[in-house]
Amino acid sequence: MIKFNEEEHSYRLGKVRLPSVTQIMKPITQPMYENISPYIMKKAADRGTEIHRWVELYDTEKQESFNPRVQAYKRWCEDTQQNPIENEYRSYHKTLLYAGTFDKLCEINGENVLIDVKTTAMLHENVVAVQCSAYREMARSHGLKVDKIAVLQLNSDGTYVYKELKDNFDLFIALYKIYAFNQKGGH
């Protein structure tokens, strides 16, 4: 069973600490955020966490909120007629031994779609594709059926952007190899 330490943002499988998808992806994500103040980053992270909680509450209990991003999510649900399968699914890849938490797996038009929910103003589609590809392979290693990957951006004006993404697991594997190299002191 995978255990998550929220304070450290770390995952453990038994006594073994596993790298997270987020840690492995740092070489491509860090440059995007290095000029943003820690205060702004914390506010954005807190907002994202709050919206993710509301998304899960809407899926499980149909709880409403006046928050425009939650309203955007409700509209997306109505537009797609999605059927939730998993929310905030924490797991690890059985062979590669990396871990992570994906936002959502749902059925849309007979296909299982793994979705990353974003509340950022700017959508980095290519980076999200790498992230979702890693989560998809992690889920598949446990027998979960995932047909597609996508991103759902919930905007502050109550609108949403939903895009299916192209697989980019090859880039994730390259980042994984760089991470492993650095962990062995390969600088």
Image (spheres, rainbow, N blue to C red):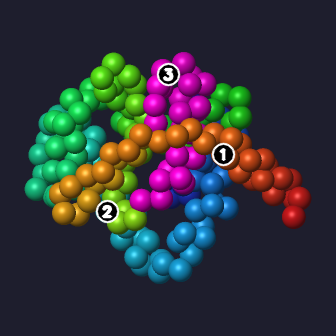
**Percent position (x, y) of residue 137?**
59, 31
| Residue at (48% x, 21% y) in the render | 145
Location of residue 173 with respect to 46 vertically, above or below: above
- Distance, label 1 to label 2, CA atoms, is 27 Å
Which stretch is magenta? 123-149
**Percent position (x, y) of residue 42?**
41, 70
Identified by mark 3, the residue type is: Leu
Location of residue 17 with respect to 34 vertically, above or below: above
Q: Is label 3 or label 1 in front?
A: 1
At label 2, counting other C-alpha atoms closer than 10 Å, the crowd grade (few under 14, some 14-19, many 20 or more) is: few
Q: Secondary structure at mark 1?
A: helix
Q: Which mark is drawn over residue 144? A: 3
Q: Secondary structure at mark 2?
A: helix
| Residue at (67% x, 62% y) in the render | 27
| Residue at (58% x, 62% y) in the render | 29
Q: Quadrant of the C terminus?
A: bottom right
- Distance, label 3 to label 1, CA atoms, is 20 Å
> In this figure, which residue is indicated by the disc labeled 1?
172
24 vs 88, left or right, is: right
> In this figure, which residue is indicated by the disc labeled 2?
47
Identified by mark 2, the residue type is: Arg
